[in-house]
Image (cartoon, rainbow, N blue to C red):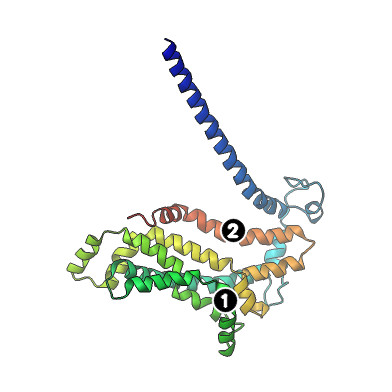
Amino acid sequence: MTADKKQFKSKTYYKWKERIKLIASYAFLIAVALFILIPFYVIFITSFKTRVEAISIPFTWLPREGWHLDGYANVLLTDASGGGAGPSTILRGFRNTMIITIPATLSGLLTSALSAYAFAKLRFRGKKVSFALLLATMMIPGIIMLVPSYMIYDALGLVDTFFPLIVPGMFGAAAAVFFLRQYFQGIPDELIEAARIDGMSEFGIFFKIMMPLSKPALLAQGILGFIGGYNDYFGPLLYLHNPKRYTLQIALAYFEGTYVFDWPTVMAGAVITLVPTIVIFLAAQKYFVEGITMTGIK
């Protein structure tokens, strides 16, 4: 009987210990989530306040004077602080960002996938050496290439155009090639061999077999590439001089400088800037997570 009581107490102690660990884990995760989400909430709620309430102390977690849309009206209708043609700095910057980001993302994803397919499924001399050299380029800090790149584009007369921001991204990225190669290696070789026996070309195998089976990985890398281009600040700041060509991030910086004392308008611009990336991630969240987690599993 004594042994049974000791065993019961031991089990009870173990259960309570596990519950305490679980509660502590959830408490920590909730605290981290709040630490990340509260700044976004402050941005969102401030965009609906009046100018006076936005700078008042103490901070109010909800608008006391009602929900106002003046900040959004300033952003979308009346602002032209960037100095270019058009009614809205933010909308003009968004248009320019899409012109730069969409072609670079789509073309870069295609070229990265083609390279990854070659490294994963084709046999050719020097494949391992070529792939090692490709990975070695990831070790080179990008800041080293800024001055030579700028000198080349300046000599070609391409500074203050979209060319330096679009064309390099259209040739893919080493990181995307690496992750897509890992995903492609998980696709059975027997499937590809059967397609070759049936007379399908390598491009046919790539577009009709590899691409449909790799949708999660392609979407994940596409989202990462799009967000990287969408949030790029230094590249446009370096190459673009005309306010009419400013991208969204540069336009937002100038916009903030113009409305430095109008926090609802500044926060409204920030909210509008955040919306596209949040919508894309929520719409493709399932594929994004699957593409990241399945990479490297054979």
> Is 285 in front, or is 128?
128
Q: Are marks 2 and 1 in contact (CB under 8 Å)?
A: no
Q: Which mark is residue 275?
A: 2
* Quadrant including the C terminus: bottom left
Please tell me how crowded label 2 is: few (under 14), some (14-19), or many (20+) other residues with Cα within 10 Å: few
**In the displayed structure, does residue 161 sit left or right of residue 135?**
right
Q: Which mark is residue 128?
A: none
Residue 14 visible: yes
Residue occupied by mark 1: 144
**In the displayed structure, does residue 204 sit left or right of residue 241?**
left
Based on the displayed image, in which of its 4 quarters is residue 272 positioned? bottom right
* Measured Cα–Cα span from mark 2 to mark 1: 33 Å
Furthest-top residue in this view:
1
Q: Residue at x 64, y 68 (%)?
A: 249
Which label sits in the foreground, 2 or 1?
Answer: 1
Name the spot of residue 195 as percent of width and height, x first. 21, 66
**Where 189 sits versus 95, above or below?**
above
Based on the displayed image, in which of its 4 quarters is residue 154 positioned? bottom right
Question: What's the residue type where badge 1 is placed?
Answer: Ile
* Quadrant including the N terminus: top left
> Is 128 in front, or is 227?
128
Name the spot of residue 8 as percent of width and height, x first. 45, 17
Q: Residue at x 36, y 73 (%)?
A: 129
**In the displayed structure, does residue 47 sit left or right of residue 149?**
right
Name the spot of residue 18 as percent of width and height, x first. 50, 30
Q: Secondary structure at mark 2?
A: helix
Furthest-left residue in this view:
197
**Where 20 sits versus 287, above or below?**
above
